[in-house]
Image (spheres, grey):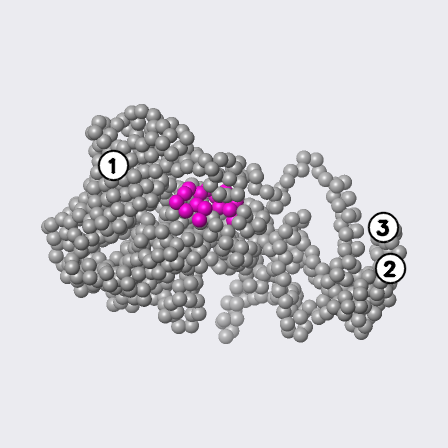
Amino acid sequence: MKIFKHVLLALLFVSVGAFAQDTEEQEKPLGHTNQNKFKQLYDEFATPNMFRTGSGAPGPGYYQQQADYKMDIEIDDEKARLYGNETITYTNNSPDELTYLWVQLDQNMRARDSKTPLINSSGFGPATTPSRVATTYLKERFDGGFNIQAVTDVKGKELPHMINRTMMRVELPNALKTGGQFSFKIKWWYNINDHVKDGGRSGYEYFKENDNRIYVMAQFYPRMAVYNDVEGWQNSQFWGRDEFALPFGNFDVNITVPADHILDGTGYLTNREEVFSKEMMKRFKKAQKSYEEPVLIVNQEEAEKTEKTKSKEKKTWKLSAQMVRDFGFATSRKFIWDMMAVKLDTKDVMAVSLYSKEGNPLWGDWSTKVVASTLKSYSRMTFDYPYHKAISAHAPMGMEYPMICYNFGRPNKDGTYSDRVKFGMMGVIIHEVGHNWFPMIINSDERQWTWMDEGLNTFTQYVAEQDFGEWYPAALSPGQTKYPSRRGPAKNIVRYMGGNQDYIAPIMTKGLNTYQFGSNAYSKPATGLNILRETIMGRGLFDYAFKEYANRWKFKHPTPEDFFRTMEDASAVDLDWFWRGWFYTTDYTDIGIKEVKKYAITTTPNEEGQKLAERYNRDPNSLVYFIEEGKEGYEAAAAANKTDAISDLPTVKEFIMDNFTSEQQKEMKSPKYFYQVTYNKPGGLVMPLIVEYTYADGTKKKETFPAQIWRLNDKEATSTIASDKEIVAITVDPDLETADVDTSNNSWPKEVKDSEFDKFKNTIKD
């Protein structure tokens, strides 16, 4: 029946379409510009070149700079102060000569004269707490900026330099040519911030009861800025929100802390036998072969004993890392330390946790297992984790660095905890460990394109959370069948998408300048990718393209265009319409059913059909006519269809006999019900049209029209149905796959739903 239906309808609707086209050409306004949602993104995308190809892959001329660091760091635990000396060796792989270098001084955001507090409007509310008044208006601001003591060449000769808030320009004695290297030294110190009281992405947490601190350290050293083919120096100021753009390099870092501290961080611990006891070495070797349960390197009893006394001695921990873009470490005498091995396809790596007794039993039960699960999930979606370990360190924040991240989640003092605390901890660990891929290895520019690390990572986090719930069902609460992910499913973004447009910005906006940062940079891009994977592309095509992007750009600097182009290049799916709507606008999805018309089929010419036949010089008696319900002749035609097979109608039977073999005729169906459904799109966002039909016998059928159904009419789309069963209901997006902000228009017959007030009244009656 497929061929039969298409032949009949093509005759009628192609003719009507031709007439409509003539009309459109006559009424075409002067000065018309292409505003079609399916317009290709040539205007928005950068022109492909030798550095970045049109396919989204690095070009033959692609380059990136390298910055290698040798550092000696010491923490003064009494003063909560960090001292540092570093030697930076900078390699110029670009085709350009450089006359100066830009260095990032991110801690200057905390300097007493920082402008960061002044970039936001402020006002007085009707009431607040005394402590907030004291903190905001009475307390002198903490001074946590860098104190740069010296900038010299390796021979000690001073180098001219200029500090502009969070950026420092270092003048080179001679132009640095292509392939050249330049080494220079910086000496500095700064006061470490209490990140619990004063905020921040690193710092210490103070425990008054035993006068101890947990340090989680990052942005603690002057770091090289990125120089690339896209914009030259990326020397955008750090105002506190947008994160970082950094080149890759090698690190050798010696960190001196009190002798009773436990420390771990980015890189291999090269003097393990010096800083480990014999018992710790024995436990470490056991952990390297333990794939099911973590092994305690330092247990809680030992940690509690250590935190009661303070050593006056010092110990230096030596860490070495290759091809990383940054460095972080955590240190405290309060740390419990456990590890387990994780088997990936190509290697074994270590999952590690550092936490204090305040984190138990939650952290001891789950932290390292969550790290292990995350390593497996992300490796499956991208590439095997290239480093030898991944550390989750306990702190009341969430932040990430190569091989180490800082994660919140603390039970009550009696050891109990809610689902919110448990899944909050698990979710943040998955997210922050996942940042090893985005952007620590797939090294996008966080300061310009926050969504490229947060959004892509939040999407992969959703996949990893679902994996974790499947692999560790004991982590779920009674009644739960899967991990309760907060971000990812389309229905969870509806409130944001349908919100006040005055406070929504396109994803393709610098993170500092967006409203509702979490929804804009995390939730919306992650949800968009989930819709691509589950609804538009399918998992097979999406996963292949996503993995291709990850492998093309690991240990490199991708841009948004590189991602967009690769996803299309590796899948043969034209997604410009999707990128345009979801990433470049604040349009939202709202697709509904405008009307449903029922038709009966007849061979008796009607007035409209006769006019059409005459116009195209057709014999009216050779055509089949559709009569809309309620119009003259409908009842008779409908009755005929329900009592006789449609193939018994004279002209149709004659048509079949003349054009199809007997075997082909046997395969044809005889539809008795005909419908024309008009869908509208009050929301501006283009999406596939997902429709579910419910039949009189209770069965259902789901059909997905590609997004291209809107390509010629952005407001309405019409479909015709020839069915051998009566349709009693039609639903658009029945499984809430497209983030439709208004489902009240998604059903036929229209569902009558109680208003919020009616629901309230009903609860009173009950």
Residue sitting nearer the eye, 118 or 609: 609
**Nearer the N terminus, badge 2 or badge 3?**
3
| Residue 467 in view, yes or no | yes
Q: Amino acid at mark 1?
A: Thr
The Cα atoms of the two marked residues, 1 and 2, are separated by: 89 Å
Residue at figure coordinates x 39%, y 72% from the top left: 478
Q: Are marks 2 and 3 in contact (CB under 8 Å)?
A: no
| Residue appearing at x 33%, y 44% in the figure | 323
Q: Within 10 angstroms of label 3, few (less than 14), some, or many (20 or more) residues?
A: few
Q: Amino acid at mark 2?
A: Ser
Residue type, mark 3 in image:
Tyr
Q: CA distance from mark 2 to mark 3?
A: 13 Å
Image depth: mark 1 or mark 2 in front:
1
Q: Residue furthest left?
A: 312
Q: State whether residue 584 is above or below residue 621.
A: above
Asked if residue 658 is among those painted magenta in the image, a careful observer would answer no
Residue 322, percent across and down?
31, 45
Q: Residue at x 54, y 67 (%)?
A: 758
- Which residues are the magenta region? 551-567
Q: What is the distance, in whole Å, between disc 1 and disc 3 at their CAs?
A: 84 Å
Residue at left offset 61%, top offset 53%? 707
Q: How many marks?
A: 3
List the residue tagged with mark 1.
87
The image's mark for residue 622 is: 2
